[in-house]
Amino acid sequence: MTRYVAPTEMREALELLQSGNFSIIAGGTDVYPALKDRPVLFDMLDLTNVAGLRGIHKTEEGWRIGATTKWTEIVRAALPASFDGLKAAAREVGSIQIQNAGTVAGNICNASPAADGVPPLLTLKALVEISSLSGKRVVALEKFIEGVRRTCLQPGEIVTAIVIPETGDAARSGFRKLGTRKYLVISTTMVAALIEPDTKGKVADARVAVGSCSPVALRLKELEADLIGTELNASLLADRLKTEHLKSLSPINDVRGSGVYRQEATAEIIRRVLSDCCMRPGT
Ligand SMILES: Cc1cc2nc3c(=O)[nH]c(=O)nc-3n(C[C@H](O)[C@H](O)[C@H](O)COP(=O)(O)OP(=O)(O)OC[C@H]3O[C@@H](n4cnc5c(N)ncnc54)[C@H](O)[C@@H]3O)c2cc1C
């Protein structure tokens, strides 16, 4: 019979993980639907009650999003404008019920190409804190997700937090997702951007990430470089986008759209998100 355990201390969780055939669960919103009618061949280690894993805190390393922090907590937290993109993504994960149960860490660990949290976290240069009985290690999100449903997590490891290094006060960000309806929809494509202007109103730092158009969401680093120095103006930023900036993407044909449609839609969504970033934060 399947065992279900819900430890309250991290040490206990790590010892249990080491001792048996456990699958980690947090909100369970990816794990449970994936079981369908199949027999459950593993035990379940629920992290929900582990002390110290929940909430968003500012620390010396930046903003720390604990591993059991729910999407709803992201929506409600008082965070700088650089998090507006992540907040917009949080509001579009499934539905209110899914946002109340699902965690940010579960989203990245599930490593779906369509995980809404990944593009905005890439633009925030998120770091993933991983704990095991032998200690802690920190990996950039860009390296953490290795492929479709594949991460660099090793047996016995638990993600304990996502850490976001500070950005400048002037940084602003956005996120847009294209789907066939507003809620409960898997993205056809999605774009997150973070722009930091200098004191003269020109782009000093730019980060643009696209999801659902490659096995792992990607930052478009050539576009980012071409945006630097451009005046913070929607049409001037849009003019910088060229077809070759999208060449690292490999959008597939599936029920949600053809590869060609995805590519064209992505270009338009990039322009819209860059335009969103030109608005004063909070408007
Ligand atoms: C109806 C529905 C709609 C959805 N809509 C969306 C959507 O629009 N966009 C979207 O991106 N997702 C969507 N999802 C997927 C899911 O809700 C999110 O990915 C959510 O963030 C997963 O978090 P969780 O805590 O529920 O993860 P869980 O299901 O608990 O875990 C997911 C995976 O991560 C692992 N894991 C979880 N936490 C840790 C940890 N701390 N350390 C190591 N491994 C860990 C688990 O072992 C499992 O492999 C939807 C799901 C449902 C059921």
Image: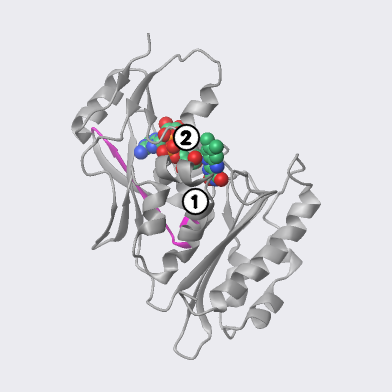
Question: Residue 48: horizontal and vertical position, in percent?
Answer: 30, 35
- On whether ligand 1 comes within 8 Å of the CB at mark 1, the answer is yes
| Magenta stretch encompasses residue 274 | no
- Classify mark 2: helix, strand or loop: loop
Residue sitting farthest toward the top: 1
Identify residue type, mark 2.
Answer: Thr
Quadrant the N terminus occupies: top left
Residue 161 horizontal side relative to residue 135, left or right: right
Identify residue type, mark 1.
Answer: Gly
Mark 1, Cα crowd under 10 Å, few <14 / some 14-19 / many 20+, is many
Question: Mark 2 vs mark 1: which is more N-terminal?
Answer: 2
Residue bearing the label numbered 2: 29
Residue 117 numbered mark, or none: 1
- On whether ligand 1 comes within 8 Å of the CB at mark 2, the answer is yes
Which residue is located at x 23 percent, y 25 percent?
15
Q: Alpha-carbon distance for marks 2 and 1?
A: 14 Å
* Image position of 209 with respect to 28: above or below: below
* Image position of 187 with respect to 171: above or below: above
Question: Residue 2: horizontal and vertical position, in percent?
Answer: 37, 13
Which residue is located at x 42 percent, y 70 percent?
81
- Classify mark 1: helix, strand or loop: loop
- Give the extent of the magenta segment: 121-133
In terms of depth relative to the viewer, which is nearer, 199 or 135? 199
**Mark 2 or 1: the one toward you:** 2
Residue 13 horizontal side relative to residue 116, left or right: left
| Magenta stretch encompasses residue 124 | yes
